[in-house]
Structures are given as C-alpha cells and as structure tokens.
Image (cartoon, helix red, strand yellow):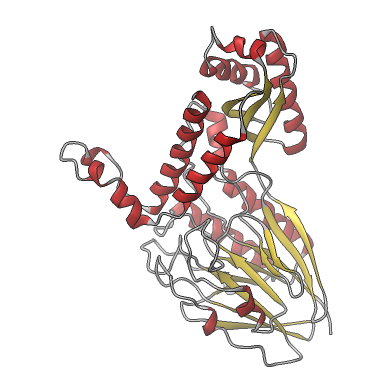
Amino acid sequence: MSAIRFFHMADLHLDSPFKGLFGLPDNNLKKIRASTFEAFDKIIHKAIEERPDFLLIVGDIYDGENRSLQAQRRFQAAMEMLFEHNIPVIVSYGNHDHLHGSWTRFALPSNVYELPADTSVVQLKIRGQQVNIYGFSYGQRHVKEAMIDRYPVAQDQHAIHIGMLHGSEASDTTHAVYAPFKKEQLLEKRYHYWALGHIHKRQLLHKEPPIVYSGNIQSRHRNEQGVKGFYDVTLSQTSAQLTFVPTSAVVYNIVEVDCTNVQHANELLQKCEEAIATNRMEYGASVMELHLKNIDEETEALFEHASVEEWLETIRESEDGVEPMGWVQKLILHKKSASNESTAMTESVISVMEQWDISEWKDILKDLYQHAGGARFVEPLTEREIEHLKLDAQELLVDEIQRA
C-alpha cells in the first residue's frame, strides 16, 4: 500500500483581536495583529512548494462566529491558490466559527470540502490508495455532548482511515470541554490517524496509531508560550511519520535573566539586553516576560528609587526600533528568599479559576453586571471576555503574592 502525505493544522483563529496589549509602538502592534495571517501564509506557501496530497484544518479557522470580512477574504484567496495547484482541503468548523453564526459568505473553490454538522466522510483516491476522512463541524457554539459515537468503525481494510475531531478529552479541564471523548473511544474506531483540534498546546495523546493535537498556528496571549505550527504527516496503513513545522510570526516567551551579583543599574540593563538578544536570535519576533532571577538584597535595592514600571519602560526604550521586534510585556522579580509556598498557592488558585464555567463567572461578577450605574460601561460577559478576565486575575494574583 502506498503512503500518503498531508498537513494537519487546527485553531488558526484568523483575525484574532489580540486584546490586552497596551503601550506598543504602532509597528509592533500591527505586526502582532497580522501574525495569524502571516502564520497561515507560511502554511499555504509551503503547501504550494511541496505539494502534499491534501490539507486538514480541524476547527476554529476564524476567531469569531461572525467571521470578519478580511479573514474570510484571506482564507478564500488561499484556497483559490491551492485549487490552482490541485491540492484538496478538508475543513471542519469549531466552537469559535460554528455554522450557526452570521456572516457575509464567500464561495470556496471545489477543492475545499466543508464538513457538515452531521458526522460524514470525505473519500479521496490518492495514487490508487483509498483514503476515508471522517469528521463534523459544530452546528452551534456549544457542543457539550460526546460526538465520538457518531463516527463509524473502519471497515474497509484496504483504505487509510483518518478522523478529524475538534474537541477535548473528557478529563481535560484546561479548556472548555466540548465534544468530549476518551482516548479508548478513538482507538476503538480503528483509524490510522486522529487529527485533533481545540486544545492549543501541541501534544501526542497516542503514538500507534497517532492521536495528535497540532496546537494553534500562532500564539494569541501570554498563556500560549513557545513556537506554534502544524504537522507534516506521511501515513500508510502500517506507519506514520510526523514532522512539526513552525509557523509562529510572533513567539510568546518567558525569558529568564540571571541577576546573581548584579549591583548597578547598567549591569542589570546589560543582562536584560543580552537575554533579549539571545531570544531574538533563536525565535525572531517575540513578546516576552522577563523573569529576573536570583535577586538578592543588593539587586533589590535597585528598585527602591525606580519602580518596576520605570525599569520596564527603560528596557523597552533600549529595544525600540530593533528588528525583529522584541516587546517586553512584563517584568517579574524573583527574590532569592522567596519560598515555593507562594508559587504553589498561585497555581492552586489559578487551577480553581480554570474550572469555573460561564455560569460561575456570571455568579461571581453579578454585583458588577447588575449595578445600575456601572453595567452599561462593561462589555457583555462572553467566553472571550472571561479568558481576558482570567489572564488579568492571574497577573494580579502573582503581583500581590510577590509583594506580600
């Protein structure tokens, strides 16, 4: 049996708004807001150059259910380019871009197979090899029920069977649990590969056969650290080879700065500049948190007459105009005397927050949203707004514990 080759990607989130970024120079802000498009363009150019047999896009192509005109136009143009090179694309829509949204529609070319709300199969013939691809699109924003029972068990022993599923393991509460499944349920279908989406962290749940989250193609905030991308997969009935391909236009990173024996301001600034330069050489354009480690009493004295905010502004000024961009979003001090107790406390509270659903957030914030004078000044409480609230709450928590 011949092998096939495809690209597995998910969670493009084209035209993500990138809220919560303040104080950036216009050119840096423009770079960040264009990063999802730039990451997507890298995939399309690689596909045209290397000609895989097909592409799988497993949900959340767009960031919102009311898909922006710009995002749809960019996606449609990319699909036209792939059409010209005879590259099929199988698409499912997820919880962010579900089928019940309201948007101005673009017609996609005939090489694009859009999966419906009911689980269905796309059949391709590649160099004589039959390939069956199973999946569904979200018919509405919330798909809480398990969809895995609607996938057929593979029957044709001569075909290669691939499952597409935008959802989460039933036990994984790091994201909202949609279309939950258990790994054993996937294995029972006897497919040769499971292409998963929804979880933005790249991970391999099972090796043979591969059950794979490709992660998102571009980080959108500080909780999505590291390089993002997709998988280039060569698959047969008996083997699978997965190659991760980076696509990040901007990398979100934590950069550690060793402050051992630092006593003077110029020493600290030099240490920070060197750490940023090293990160720039390895990752290119980045949004960073600088974590100043091993701060003793002499180093801490540098912050008595200049606040952390002043230090942060000074570091940013030294990086202004340097390419590729290196934006320092936050400066965090780690004192030598700090115990692990505060870290454990922080992680414990954050873990509890991650498990709250939208109804619990509404209950917690009801006084604010029911206040006659203030309610009209706050945004409606959506799941996207909750994600931003989580990030802000986590940052405040860390700051307060460190000051204690």
Q: Is residue 219 above or below residue 211?
A: above
Image position, residue 269 (x, y; %): 68, 15
Question: Is residue 282 left or right of 122 when viewed as pictured?
Answer: right
Q: Is residue 330 visible?
A: yes
Q: Is residue 221 visible?
A: no
- Of 13 and 45, nearer the camera is 13
Q: Is residue 391 above or below residue 404?
A: below
Residue at 74% from the left image edge and 57% from the top image edge: 46
Image position, residue 247 (x, y; %): 68, 50
Image position, residue 145 (x, y; %): 44, 75
Question: Is residue 115 left or right of 245 when viewed as pictured?
Answer: left
Residue at 41% from the left image edge and 60% from the top image edge: 65
Using the rendered view, name the quadrant where residue 140 is placed: bottom left
Image position, residue 40 (x, y; %): 62, 53
Using the rendered view, name the quadrant where residue 226 is placed: top right
Residue at 46% from the left image edge and 50% from the top image edge: 352
Q: Is residue 272 above or below residue 162?
A: above
Taking the view exactly as shown, the residue that stands out farthest to the left is 372
Residue at 69% from the left image edge and 58% from the top image edge: 230
Using the rendered view, name the quadrant where residue 151 is placed: bottom right
- Of 126 and 73, nearer the camera is 126
Exactly how many numbered labels are in the figure? 0
Question: Is residue 4 left or right of 291 when viewed as pictured?
Answer: right
Q: Is residue 39 above or below residue 342?
A: below
- The N terminus - image quarter: bottom right
